[in-house]
Image (spheres, rainbow, N blue to C red):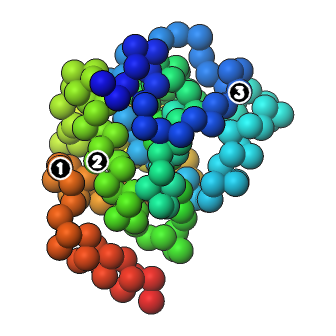
Amino acid sequence: MSISVGGWISWAEQRVGPGQKTNSGVNPVLGAFLHSAEGYANGLWSVLADVSPPLEQRVSWHLSNLIDGRLVQHYSLQAQCWHATAANTAYIGIEHEGKVPEEPTLTPAQIATTRRVIAEISQHYGWTPRRPTSATDLTATLYEHSEIVRWPGGKGSRCPSGRIPWDLILAGGDMTDEEKFLYTEAFKTLMR
């Protein structure tokens, strides 16, 4: 199994964040919030390591999906990280390296990694990957950060929506060579 009893993914690189940037409870992992990092790896590592801001301004997340598709794990999936205000205690946070407008959507490598990690986590924790069906749906398992406002006390962020290609992620399985080619060509077109 690729996820240990302690909530660590065997194929992810580990770059553990400071322990004081999580709550003390156990996360039941009811789903995941996918974020656009709006930055690159070195900046992400700096934000994650920074414990100087006031407590209410500190952020942490479980996984970073880098532009080249490498997955980096910072905390056990069972940790309650600070990435989605009202949902911190029950959902994991996945940051996707890159920012708008430079990377208007995820790279094919990031899509493949996101598909794999969602498939493995959902199987391990016993839920079905599902997007919300309405603006008030709290029963879905996959959200973007801007969708946190549907929870009482949920606060949006500068994390833009629209970078996560849900149709490709939820298609399941590995991307075919044709999908990779078409997606790469579409990505190049967006970058012109």
For the residues labelled 1 and 3, say whether their Cβ atoms are less than 8 Å apart. Answer: no
Q: Which residue is the site of mark 2? A: 115
Assign the N terminus to one quadrant of the image: top left
What residue is at 33 percent from the left and 76 percent from the top? 184
Task: Decide if residue 147 is in sight here.
Answer: no
What residue is at 38 percent from the left and 60 percent from the top? 109
What number is the disc on residue 173? 1
SS for tag 1?
A: loop
Crowd around label 1: few <14 · some 14–19 · many ≥20 (10 Å): few
Residue type highlighted by circle 2 = Arg
Crowd around label 3: few <14 · some 14–19 · many ≥20 (10 Å): some
Observer-nearest residue: 135 or 51?
Answer: 51
* For residue 69, above or below residue 85: below
SS for tag 2?
A: helix
Observer-nearest residue: 59 or 176?
Answer: 176
What residue is at 57 percent from the left and 35 percent from the top? 14
Alpha carbon separation for disc pair 1 and 2 = 7 Å
Residue type highlighted by circle 3 = Pro
Q: Which residue is the site of mark 3? A: 18
